Amino acid sequence: MTGNSPERTILLVVHAGRSDATEVARRVAKVLADNGIGLRFLSAEAVDRGPVQLSPHDIQALGAEIEVVDADERAAEGCELVLVLGGDGTFLRAAELARNVEIPVLGVNLGKIGFLAEAEAEAIDQVLDHIVRRDYRVEERMTLDVSVRVGGEVVDRGWALNEASLEKGPRLGVLGVVLEVDGRPVSSFGCDGVLVSTPTGSTAYAFSAGGPVLWPDLEAIIVVPNNAHALFARPMVTSPDAAIAIEIEASGHDALVFCDGRREMVLPAGGRLEVTRCGTPLKWVRLDSAPFTDRLVRKFRLPVTGWRGP
């Protein structure tokens, strides 16, 4: 850390594999420094990686207050917010650092779709102006508790912002499952897997698997069978307080569980995946009041030709 500790600190999480991240990150560092706001940087990203040439020395040369920290559960502690420069994968990585310490996350898209981002890279000056003036609001997004239970005992546990994805192992046959909601069986079927998603995740993997799009201010849990071999195996939307469980056949093979496509758990044959609403939501920075409908149309480039309005 250089100089006295600033009253305000921002944790910067950057997609270190993108060359365009360098210019944007340097702009962030300069504007924050000019306004007396400290910058915290992850040590894993504070070295040259691929085309990105961004190091603590680069930022210090701009006069920024910089603190290099490990990418662990305390990385965001004490920060005002986490600023993400990257795509949805980078945002999800930042969410891992921010959720437990209840620090809000603000995404700036450097990727392709960037559905989780609040702004595009070309609007970085406007984003920084909002940060400097504290002109933003914080919403809460629902998350999921994800548990693996074997023989009545929880053997692994995780959480998800987008979805928990139960998947068969590579090069293995159909996965036999029984779906349960609130302690009652719903249906048994063979499949490639089952997704349990939040409304935030409804535009991610669950959408690709044929699930519905849910507006993020709607609280619910979505269950989407993936390539199911059954007539009734259709996407379902349950209460946000529902207890979802998926049991896999004891005579079958082990399966894998992925939380947001990042954190992996093994579900042994005969085991049980349990998913419920988590008591710790993710705090999410919003810069304007633009409706979700506009974001949906813009990100997916949906045709609206012929719309006349009310």
Image (cartoon, grey):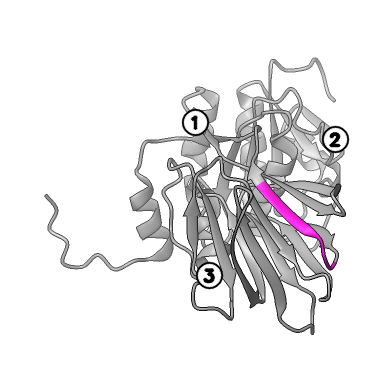
Residue 268 location, quadrant = bottom right
Query: Which residue is labeled 3 in the image?
Result: 208
Labelled pair 1, 3 in contact (Cβ < 8 Å): no
Who comes first in sequence, dot 3 or dot 2? 2
Who comes first in sequence, dot 1 or dot 2? 2
Q: Position of residue 122 (x, y in %)?
A: 49, 50
Q: CA distance from mark 1 to mark 2?
A: 25 Å
Disc number at residue 129? Answer: 1
Q: CA distance from mark 1 to mark 3?
A: 36 Å
Disc number at residue 204? Answer: none
Badge nearest the viewer, 1 or 3: 3
Task: Give amino acid for label 1.
Answer: Asp
Between 250 and 91, which is closer to the camera in this rendering? Answer: 250
Q: CA distance from mark 3 to mark 2?
A: 36 Å
The span shown in magenta is: 269-275
Q: Residues within 10 Å of mark 1 (few under 14, many from 20)?
A: few
Q: Residue at x 84, y 62 (%)?
A: 266
Disc number at residue 69? Answer: 2
Q: Residues within 10 Å of mark 3 (few under 14, many from 20)?
A: few
Task: Give amino acid for label 2.
Answer: Val
Position of 189 relative to 287 (above/below) = below
In this rendering, the count of numbered labels is 3
Position of 54 relative to 258 (above/below) = above
Between 34 and 235, which is closer to the camera in this rendering? Answer: 235
Q: Label 1, secondary structure: give it.
A: helix
Q: Position of residue 232 (x, y in %)?
A: 49, 72
Residue 306 located left or right of residue 229: left
Residue 103 seen in the figure: yes
Q: Residues within 10 Å of mark 2 (few under 14, many from 20)?
A: some
Q: Position of residue 159 (x, y in %)?
A: 72, 46
